[in-house]
Amino acid sequence: MPSGIPGFDGALGGGFYESSTVLVSGVAGTGKSTFSAHFLADACARGEKALYVALEQSPDEFLRNTAGIGLRLRPYVSKGLLHFHALRPTAHGLELHLTRIHQLVEELEPAVVVVDPITSFLGMGINAEVTSMLVRLIDFLKTKQITLYMTSLSEDGGINDRAGANISSVVDTWLVLRNPERDGNRVPTLVIVKSRGMAHSSATHEFAITSKGVALKTGSTA
């Protein structure tokens, strides 16, 4: 399936496999939610149903912020293609959250599910409990042949953020977004850490978030 970002599918080796699990991690402000919005928009444009599990932003905030960068998702809500499940992780236990997501999947039958960000679950229990919950969610969606797209907040911009590191062995594609400083300016970059079964790029790719969404810059650094 397409990533929804122009020019990025080639770096991935063709895109994502259907019913695979994608993880996008990075520090705050690197564009994780924007990447997920592109994925949602592309799925809905193909006429597929999508479920967005919002753990930090409200649906209105997400729709407003994405509209500001040229991704107009509200019409897909009106058409019944894009559905939101907004929750505060601390409002209920992990098991209840997992059960509710299962119920929504059974009711809506989406082709894709986005959880943004999974790191919000870390305040609800020890790492092992959160990892177990996420692995069970991954397994459930794979049996339903649903593609899962997750974001994870990293503290240091590396590949060792707690949520990402704990499930890295079970995700199919792992993207890391960084925002290093160069000549006094922040330069957004992405690295494809892994993408099973795909001849993906191993380069560091620069990108920009524009009025039309994510734009990959031509050329890359190894």
Image (cartoon, rainbow, N blue to C red):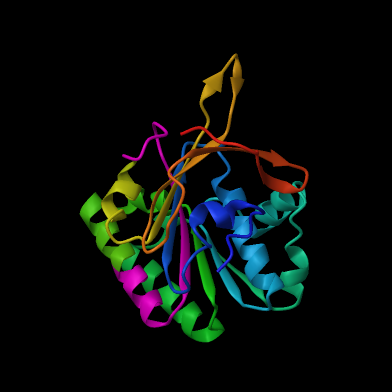
Residue 136 shown left or right of residue 200 in the figure: left
Magenta range is 136-160
Among all residues in the image, which is located at the extreme top? 183
Q: Is residue 78 visible?
A: yes
Residue at 53% x, 72% y is: 112
Q: Which percent across, then down, holds residue 131?
A: 27, 58
Q: Is residue 126 visible?
A: no
Residue 6 shown left or right of residue 151 in the figure: right
Whether residue 95 is in magenta: the answer is no
Q: Quadrant of the N terminus?
A: bottom right
Q: Which percent across, then down, holds residue 104?
A: 50, 78
The answer to which of 123 and 40 lies nearer the viewer is 40
The answer to which of 106 and 202 lies nearer the viewer is 202
Residue 60 shown left or right of residue 132 in the figure: right
In this rendering, the answer to whether 3 lies above or below 137 is: above
In this rendering, the answer to whether 71 lies above or below 177 is: below
Q: Which percent across, then down, holds residue 22?
A: 44, 59
Residue 158 shown left or right of residue 125 in the figure: right
In this rendering, the answer to whether 144 lies above or below 210 is: below
Q: Which percent across, then down, holds residue 125?
A: 27, 53
Residue at 55% x, 78% y is: 110
Whether residue 158 is in magenta: the answer is yes
The answer to which of 193 and 104 lies nearer the viewer is 193
The answer to which of 105 and 184 lies nearer the viewer is 184
